[in-house]
Structures are given as structure tokens and as C-alpha cells.
Image (tube, rainbow, N blue to C red):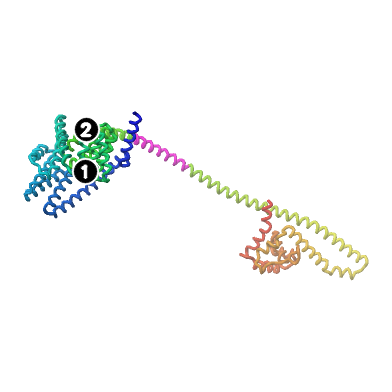
Amino acid sequence: MIKYISSFFFLFLTSITTLYGQDLKTVLNRLDEAIDNRPEYIANKQKKLDDLQIETSRKTGEDQYNGYKLLFHEYRTFSADSALHYAHVCNEWALAHQDFVKLQDSQIMEAVGLAVIGQYEQANTLISKLENYVYPENKEDYYSARTDISYWQGAFSSLKSVKEKYYIISRTYRDSLNYITQNKTFKEQASVIIQGWTDPKGSISATRKYIRDLPEGHDSIRYFANHLGTIYQLEGKRDSSEYFFAISAISDMERGVREHSSLINLTMQLFEDGEIDRAYKYMTQCLNDANESLSALRNLEMSKMMSPIMEAYNKKLKHQERILFWISITLAILLIIIILELFRIYRISKKLKAAQDIVLKANEDLRISNEKLALSLEKEKTMRNNLLESNRIKDTYLANYMSDCSKFIDKLDAYRKSLHQLVMRNNIDKLFSSIRSTEFIENEIELFYKGFDETFLSVFPNFVEEFNKLLTPEGQIIPPAKKRLTTELRIFALIRLGITDSNDIAKFLRYSVKTIYNYRTKVRNTALGNRNELEDKLKEIGIEKEKKES
């Protein structure tokens, strides 16, 4: 048995959330959104009423009366004084046209309007005058009015016995209404309400069926949903009750209805659930609507619920104010701490900035010192390379010089011996002939040049190629043979060795100074780039190789 009950309860809860495909939280959020959009809905409702007024003013005969009656019903849940106004307009129209059926109909409307604003005695007095005879055309409106007036009067009373008295009267009239009405929707509403008094579960099932059959946005949804909310509330099923009260309230909001009970009931339940903020929001909306519609019953209901909600809301606000106060104190303390910390950080940053400036200056000084040191090291390296090169050149030339001197001494000794033999033989003519001949000197000079060329090219094997790279194609100098130099190459070879003075070069090569100058000028004129830099570039030949080796 328990298993079946559990399954039924699960299906029941599932049906609540699937009736409109939403759960309670989603429906409440929809209601919040509808209340936020309330001004737009009210504006739409007012425009609808204005258009209906204009349309009715253009009508004549019974069509105009029906327009005024429709305006009464539209205003009944929107503005009670406007509803009463159109009830009086209908009354004046009926008097003017001597239509007693419509005169009675207008009096029924006036009684309802009086009951809405809380004038129950006048409403009962007026409608009681009609009970002796009610035209068949007016019976449905008559019993509907008696049902509502009796119910509102019971709800308005503070005495339980009086409440029960008028509720019983209201049920009696509703039974009569259900019996005589031909309106299917109205009959369904009456039947489920009557059934709810004796068979709540059956009423719930029937009402849910009616709701499912109605198109979305239908006006009767708010009545059926309110009825379901009321029954579930009586049975203690709070979530279901709140769900359907919210559905009914959403319909009220969207249709611009101001005289409603669903939102009031939902507000009280949410307040009891502890949702103070939402209850306060809904209460404010209910209060505004009750004041705008001039509904006495809703104002009474609001006065009963407003005090505890306001008290709880103010209590919550005070609690939040205390929390905000302590949060403000805490934030102020934190702000002071942050300001002090920022001031401390600022002082530290100033010190760090000063230290950083010192470090930057020291780094700059160190960089300059490093650059000077690097320059000095480079100069030292250049000097060391030059020194190594000079030593290598000196060693090479010293060895060749010693060898050449030894050979030259041997040749001079042989030449002396040959002259001595001529003297001993008294061969004077041949002696003078040998002395006058330059052949010996020329041969020795040629051998000297050959030795110089070979020695220089052994020290600078790529001299000719490197030197030609400094000249234009037209100025290239081609040696006469391998390991031999031309006069121009010998001049610049001596310059490479550090002998730059033309006088010294002229003595070395046994040429005039002018000849040496002309050779130097001729070659400089064929230099690539700046001709004045040729001899400086010349001195770089062979140095790169020395650097790589070092």
C-alpha cells in the first residue's frame, strides 16, 4: 500500500512541474518578471479600455449598451469607481430607452460595483429589491452577483460566525448559478468550486483537466489556478498551492487585473516560508493594485498582512544595516591599513628608486669602464699582433740577412782572389776591365731583389691577391713570375713592412725619389674607394690571419 501511495505522490509532484513544463522556482521567476513588466501591461490594458470607450461611443442602440456593460466588466477588476460609473451609464441608458430588462441588469452591475468598494449594505439593499422577480435574461448575472457579494461580505467580516453565514449563502447562490447557467466555462468554474467543498480530490482532478484543455493565455486560467491554489492550501500542500497561486497571479499581471486574491495568498505563504524580500515585493504590488482598484476587500486583506510583513522586512533591513555598518567599519579599517601600507610602500619605493639610480649610475660607470677596458684590450691585442708580426718579419729577414751576408762575403772574397791573381799575373788590362764592369753589381742587385721577393712572399703569401682586391680591375698588377714582384709591388711591399718614406724606398730600390713618388701616385689612382686610404688598408694585409691564429 505504501508503495502505491509513494508512486502516486511522485506522479502528483511530477504532474505539478509538467502541467506547464516548469517548476515552482521557474514560475516564481516568471511572476517576478511579470511584476517588473507591470507598467507595460497596465499601459496595454488602459489602451484597450480607451479603444473600447471610443468604439462604444460610436455605437447606437443595444450595441452601445453592450459596450458600456463590457466596459463595466473590464473596469470591475481594474478600477471600481470607473466600473460604478459605467453601471450608472447603463442605468441611464435603460431609463432613457424604457428597457426594464436592461434597467434591472444595470442595477445588478451597480450592486456589484458597490460591493467591490466595500458598501455591502447598499449593495445588498439594492440587489434584494430584485429578488421578487428576476428577468430570465438577467438570472445568470443575478446569481453570480449574489454569490460574489455574499462571499466578499463573509470574507470582509472579522467574526467567524458571520463569515460562515455569508459563505453558506454564497454557496447556495452558486448552486443556483450552476443550475441555470448555459456558459460552459462559467459552469465548469462553478462546478469545480462546489465540488471542492465536498470532494477536494475530485475537484483538483477536474480543475486540472479544464486548465489543460484551455488555450494558453485564456482568462479562465486565473480562476481555475486560484481554485487549485486554494484547495492545495487547505490540504496543506504548500508547494502545489504556491505554484498555482503564482500561475493565477501571472495571468492577473499580464491581463492588467488589479483586483486579485492569488498574489495576496501567495504573498502570505512566501512570508511564512521566510522569503521576506519576495513577500515584500509582492505585498507592495498588492497594495498598489488595491489602492488603484479601490477594492475594499483587498485593502482589508492587505491591512492584515502588511503589518507582519513590514515588521519582518524592517527587521531584516535593520539586520542588513547592522551588517553593512560592520562591513563599513571593517572596510574603513582595511582602507586605513591599505593607505598606511601604500604610504610605507611609497617610502620604500623612493628608497628603492634612489638605490636603483645609484645602481644604474654604477652600472653606467662600469659599462664605460668595460668599454674602455675592451678598447684597451683591443689596442693591446692589436699591438701584440703587430709585435708578433714584427718579430716574425724580423726573424725571417734576419735569418735571410745573415745568409745573404755570408754568401756576399764569400762572393767578395772570390772576387778579391780573382783580382789578386790578375795582379800577380800582371794582367793590368783585364784587371782594369774587371774593375770598370758593372756586371757583378747588377747580378748581385738582381739576386737581392729575388731574395727580397721570395722572403716577403714567404711572410705574406697572399699579398698580391689581397693587394689587387684594393684596386680597380684596370689597375690590377700581375707579377712577372711566381714568387717575384714588380717594382710597384716592391714599393708597396716595403710600405707594408713599415718603410713609408719615399727617400728610404728610393735608396732601397736604387731609384730616384720622383720615380718612387710617380709609382705610388699611379697605383693610388687605381684604388677602390678613397685613394687616400689605400696605404692604410694595405697595412691590414696579413693581420686578420694573425688574429685568427692568436
Is 38 situated left or right of 528 in this image? left
Residue 393, percent from left and from top: 73, 56
Task: Report crowding for label 2: few under 14, some 14 to 19, many 20 or more residues within 10 A (C-alpha).
Answer: few
**Label pair 2/1, CB-CB below 8 angstroms:** no
Q: Amino acid at mark 2?
A: Thr
Q: Classify residue 394 by image quadrant.
A: bottom right
Residue 544, percent from left and from top: 66, 56
> Does the image show residue 259?
yes
- Say which residue label 2 marks: 198
Question: For residue 226: magenta?
Answer: no
Residue 99, percent from left and from top: 8, 48
| Element class at badge 1 | helix
Q: Which residue occupies 13% across, 54% down?
A: 59
Q: Classify residue 190 by image quadrant.
A: top left
| Residue found at the far right of this picture | 425
- Work out whether residue 265 or residue 541 is closer to the camera in this orientation and state it: 265
- Say which residue label 1 marks: 185
Is 85 situated left or right of 22 in this image? left
Q: Which residue occupies 24% across, 40% down?
A: 224
Is the magenta region chiefly helix, strand or loop? helix
Q: Which residues are magenta?
A: 330-354
| Element class at badge 2 | helix
Q: Amino acid at mark 1?
A: Thr
- Work out whether residue 281 or residue 392 is closer to the camera in this orientation and state it: 281
Question: For residue 331: magenta?
Answer: yes
Of mark 2 and mark 1, the one earlier in the sequence is 1
Image: 399 above or below 72: below
Identify the image quadrant of the N terminus. Answer: top left
Residue 173, percent from left and from top: 15, 37
> Does the image show residue 296?
no
